[in-house]
């Protein structure tokens, strides 16, 4: 059972002619990377173990709709729009993502994935600034400490003035 709690996969099971299709989530042992990758699922009240064994039959609607997915945070299987199965149209993909409220999570994940260079640059910049500050601190400790204290004080005063003006502008002077 512990092997199946790792990842979540969406499943479908109705006739493909229906405009309303059935969406449910189950725990699986591995995210299917490609459309035809096999996996084992943990049955739920909505999805039986047999449903996970076969890809969907277009006439009976029994089985799961196959699609490729990406593992996110080692715990979730997010459908990859570049590896969708034959029966999943862009509209059904949007419905599937919306039914499980994955659109917001997937948007954040996509943004994080797209901006990874920005995060690496930011981390590198912070490390470089910390190293330079420590080197300067070794040689100019007294001056840097006083500059830090004075700079912090000026920053706090400037922040309080800005917040006070923002409050008066947006909420009125008497609020």
Image (spheres, rainbow, N blue to C red):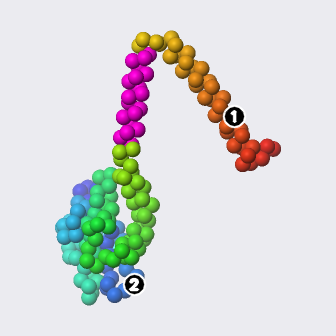
**What residue do we see at 25% from left, 77% from top?**
86
Q: Position of residue 14 (x, y in %)?
A: 33, 82
Q: Which mark is residue 10?
A: none
Q: Are marks 2 and 1 in contact (CB under 8 Å)?
A: no
Q: Is residue 130 magenta?
A: yes
**What residue do we see at 24% from left, 83% from top?**
57
Which range is magenta? 119-137
The residue carrying mark 1 is: 161
Q: What secondary structure is found at the residue carrying circle 2?
A: loop
Give the quadrant of residue 34: bottom left
Q: Is residue 24 left or right of residue 30?
A: right
Q: Nearer the viewer, residue 66 or 53?
A: 66
Give the quadrant of residue 23: bottom left
Q: Is residue 17 visible?
A: yes
The residue carrying mark 2 is: 19
Q: Is residue 145 magenta?
A: no
Q: Position of residue 147 (x, y in %)?
A: 55, 18
Q: Position of residue 94 (x, y in %)?
A: 40, 72
Q: What secondary structure is found at the residue carrying circle 1?
A: helix
């Amino acid at each position: 059972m512990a092997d199946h709690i790792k990842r979540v996969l969406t499943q479908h099971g109705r006739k493909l002619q229906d405009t309303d299709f059935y969406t449910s989530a189950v725990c699986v042992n591995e995210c299917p990377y490609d459309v035809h990758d096999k996996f084992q699922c943990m049955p739920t009240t909505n999805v039986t173990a047999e449903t996970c064994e076969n890809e969907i039959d277009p006439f009976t609607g029994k089985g799961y709709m196959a699609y490729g997915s990406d593992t996110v945070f080692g715990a979730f299987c997010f459908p990859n729009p570049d590896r969708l199965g034959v029966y999943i149209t862009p509209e059904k993909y949007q419905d599937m993502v919306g039914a499980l409220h994955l659109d917001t999570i997937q948007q954040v994940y996509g943004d994080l994935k797209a901006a990874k260079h920005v995060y690496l640059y930011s981390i590198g910049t912070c490390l470089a600034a910390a190293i330079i500050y420590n080197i300067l601190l070794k040689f100019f400790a007294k001056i840097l400490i006083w500059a830090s204290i004075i700079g912090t004080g000026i920053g706090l005063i400037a922040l309080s003035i800005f917040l006070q003006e923002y409050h008066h502008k947006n909420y009125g002077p008497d609020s």
